[in-house]
Amino acid sequence: MENACNHLDKREIWYSAIPLLLLIPLLIFNNQLMSIFTEGSILDYLRLIMKILIVVFTMTIAIHSWLVFSQLLINHTLYIGSVFFLIALLEIANIVISVPQSVDTILIGVWIQIFMRMALVIGILLIIAKPRKKLTLAHRRVAYGIAILTVMLMLFSLYKVQPFLEEHQPITPHTVQLLTGAIQGVSIYFLSKHYKSARKQVLWLISGSVYLILSDIVFIFSKDDNAIWMFIALFYQFFAYYVFLKAIYYTSVEKPYLQLLKIKQDLEQSQQELTFQAYHDDITQLPNERLLLKTLKEELHKDSKRKAVISIEIDRLATISDSLGISNSNKMMKLVAERIQAMLPPHYFATKLRESQFVIYINHVQTQEELIQFCLNIKSTMEKPLQVQLFSLKGNVNMGIAFNEKNCSAEELLMHAQLAMREASQIPQRFLFYKEHMSTGVADRILLEQELHRALDQQEFYLDYQPQINLKTGKIESVEALVRWRHPVHGFVPPDKFIDIAEESGLIIPLGKWILETACLQAKAWEAQGLPKMKVAVNLSLGQLFQQDLVQMVKEILQRSKLEPAYLQLEITESMTMNIDQMTQLLHELKALGIQIAVDDFGTGYSSLSYLKEFPIDCLKIDRAFVHNIQHDANDEALVSMILSMAKHLRLKVVAEGIEEVAQLAFLVAGDCDYIQGYLFSKPITAEQLSATFNDLHVHADQILEQYKCGKENGI
């Protein structure tokens, strides 16, 4: 703004230089013009007119500064006003005194002229050199009062010293002109130092000072007081005051006005930005929940058109975002928002809600098939991986659709769409229309989520351990750690009820850390109790997998627990292996710690098997769903046989889960399976139970294996 105010217009420069052109016709037509002013009275009248105009201009500056100061309260405005008020009073006094033309009045006029020029120089220097400062209205009366008092004292002093001045005559008019010209030269010097910071003001003030100097020069070299040159001298003096008025007007009115105008524009822009921020998401720039609810309240029942809301959630996106960090999380949200916006029809209104949710409002739904097709398009678009630096992320899209009813409020409509969205996560289509029964059990789920946060602090979680039997030795060489929740009111809460909620709420990160550390400490505790060293297997959630400090966290836990890395096995699910690029580096870093890597629920995923050669995997775990029907379903039997054969060729160990019958055991032994885990040998038990019954568990395992061998020998 300051640069814009100080920008010089070429017209202003030419405007300041025009009076100089008057010298040209005066020099060329000097004799002709001299004849016009042969009568002394004409020149006297012109002088009087010029002096009156000077009084008008200087008094205008003084009055203007008086009025403006009450609004600005700036010292510059006050100083300039009081100085020009002083000059106006002195000029009035000079006019009154010079009416009777005498030696006394001429001499007093000379001294008044000197004092006026000095006051003017002081005023010009003050407007530039003095730092800006806030004053009070009381200062205005003081400053203008000092100006009046100064004029009175000066006139009184001149009256008293008049005899001395008449006798000695220390100063002549020409001397006055030289002195005032020198004073103006000093002011120009000081003004030039401030040219860069205030170009317009300084240009005009220097122009005024130059014209005052020209006025003095013309006066000195004029041979006849009645010559036209005396008129030109007065004209230059008049124009100088006019330029001073222009500079002061710019400083005290125009520039503050422009600044106020800029402030107003900035305030309007800030207001617009604040309004935008209040109704839009900071990351995606999409309208937020506040604007959505405002729009719904205004338009939902405005007409009879059928309206709908689609609530969209990127599955596990909130957990992934928490794990990636703020920067990468924001980039991911932007990518998702861009994809949604790119495919919106004109009458679809997209908004961003909390965390991983987006909501689309449709103000006119023509057919239900239109919404179904839109959901299918969203699903297809989101199946493409989201590339965020080294991460290539892919997740399922859950969508819920709700139509407006007669008595349905904006909040209720939005809640209905979100309930349908939650239900949609359980079906392959991934989108559902809202039905009334979906509202059942919502309060219980919300309450459970709140209690889940408290449960970790209250130490309501504990671990059970299910032994894994080495089929070749019959020994318990490893266990799987399984988290349990003992609720103080509801008792045992199954993992399938709270794990998903922990994933969605982000609690899976601290909970997973607690599980890992507890399992490692327990494995070391068993060793201290004299039990053989056992490997402990711990499941990693998707949220933990994208945790930025996962490798460091595992390393620190191993150091604190003093567990040898070889006795820790981290298990990932097959669905986590879909993003091979990002997983490869992470698993290699974990593997470098010396731990074991296993793929849990193998065979239930949909990804390419190429990860088996890319990842540093030690073990495959066959999902219990295949083992359960192994003796009844030829397809399951073929799949398990293929997994066992493939693992053998890839030199991977195999653990079969969910073994409950000897017939299942027989099939797996025949297929050269390495480890067995299931109720046939032992259900998940506490750490204390495992310690107390460790030998009994081995005896039981031997009996089962002996039973299998006897059955085989008897051809059963």
Image: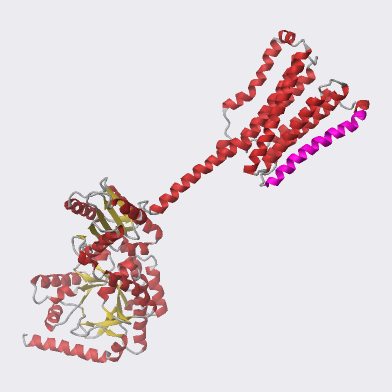
> Is residue 36 magenta-colored?
no
* Rendering coords of residue 353 (x, y %): 34, 58
- Image-based side of 572 in relation to 13, left or right: left
Q: Is residue 454 at all visible to an observer of this figure?
A: yes
Look at the picture and state if 600 lies above or below 348: below
Task: Please say if 9 is above or below 506.
Answer: above
Quadrant where the C terminus sits is bottom left
Q: Which of 626 and 45 lies nearest the eye of the viewer?
A: 45
Say whether residue 192 is visible: no
- In the image, taking residue 562 as reference, residue 234 lies left or right, namely right
Residue 215 image-quadrant placement: top right
Residue 511 location, x and y as percent? Answer: 35, 74
Quadrant of the rendering where the N terminus is positioned: top right
- Please provide percent x and percent y for residue 416: 25, 61
Q: Furthest-left residue in view?
A: 715
Residue 371 pos. (x, y %): 20, 53
Give the magenta-colored segment's residue range.
135-164
